[in-house]
Image: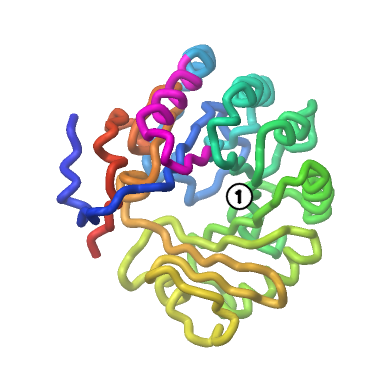
Amino acid sequence: MDLDLSQYFIVEEKPVFNLSIKLVIPSGCGMKCPFCFNLLNKNTAVYDKEAFLNNFIDSLNHIIDTAGPKRSISLDITGNEPTHDIGLFIATMQKINTIKHRFNKIVLTTNGENLSKFDVLKHVGDVVDFVNLSVHHYNESERCKAFGVQPIDSLFYGHIIDVLHSYNIKVTAVAVLYKELNTTFVAFVRNFAIWAKKFRFDNIRIRSNFYKKDDFFTRYMNDTTFGNEIIRAEGLNTKYLDVDGMEVILLQGVTSLIGHVVGVEAVVDDDGKPYIDYGKCYPFNSKYIEHVYVLKK
């Protein structure tokens, strides 16, 4: 099946120098987040561990070779929850370790449920440069609503971050806002910054999942009361703040999963094969990483 990009994008005639590859480990998840991409896209992992382990290194090498030596290529290790199946996660990290020199940076996106178990942290330390730790809220009761289960205790975050820092790994606190807050957005950001600083996070990223013209997160992004706290803005979709010495990144979501990946990302999915979308609809094709594709408003 070929993809008609004109339905979704305006093509910018300039090359893509930065390419992110998402690696989807088919490991399941112990959380029940209502905003999960897997739920929203009705994408059920095949959980064929053998197929994934047999295929994914070849797929990563194929994408890197196709992209060429002038690209800055990063790897985002994700899932479901990539550490949920500990044996599969460790086997995956051992294989990545053999080709980690081919990436400019390697990021692990995790909810942290197994980061302290069975030498998981050691294998993270051997491979990963950055960890995106999904926490979703500084308040534990609100965090429970976001995860759908009892969340990780804040003190545990501090312990994990200290160990990750010992490996020189920087840690980002990630919050996905899937509904309106019961406080002002400015108050939420400032309280989040205080909490994150206490538990030694390096920075914060707050985002929505999907872009809609008049949704609540768009209003949050356009909030002018941040004033001089804004370091810079990249279009309408990204803002960088300095809140009491803590870097806070605000990231507007996207309209569709197709829009999330084409032109700037490739995906090695739960079968270990390469695609250009998270839902395994479109096999990887080099022509879709040759230019920047700007989402139509």
Q: Is residue 191 left or right of residue 9?
A: right
Q: Position of residue 189 (x, y in %)?
A: 62, 73
Which residue is farthest front?
Answer: 70
Was residue 210 drawn as part of the magenta stretch in this picture?
no
Is any atom of residue 71 visible in this view? yes
Magenta segment: 55-75
Which SS does the magenta portion mostly show?
helix
Between 112 and 21, which is closer to the camera in this rendering? 21
Q: Is residue 34 left or right of residue 92?
A: left
Is any atom of residue 271 visible in this view? no
**Of the residues shown, which amino acid type is indicated by label 1?**
Phe
Residue at 68 percent across and 25 percent down: it is: 86
131 above or below 221?
A: above
Element at label 1: helix
Was residue 67 drawn as part of the magenta stretch in this picture?
yes
Between 158 and 139, which is closer to the camera in this rendering? 158
Between 63 and 144, which is closer to the camera in this rendering? 63
Residue at 52 percent across and 67 percent down: it is: 250
Between 131 and 29, which is closer to the camera in this rendering? 131
> Splitting the image into 4 quarters, where does residue 246 fall?
bottom right
Residue at 35 percent across and 48 percent down: it is: 16
Q: Position of residue 198 (x, y in %)?
A: 80, 65
**Dot 1: few (<14), some (14–19), or many (≥20) neighbours within 10 Å?**
many
**Image quadrant containing the N terminus:** top left
Q: Is residue 15 left or right of residue 185?
A: left
Judging by the rendered image, the residue that carries numbered circle 1 is 147
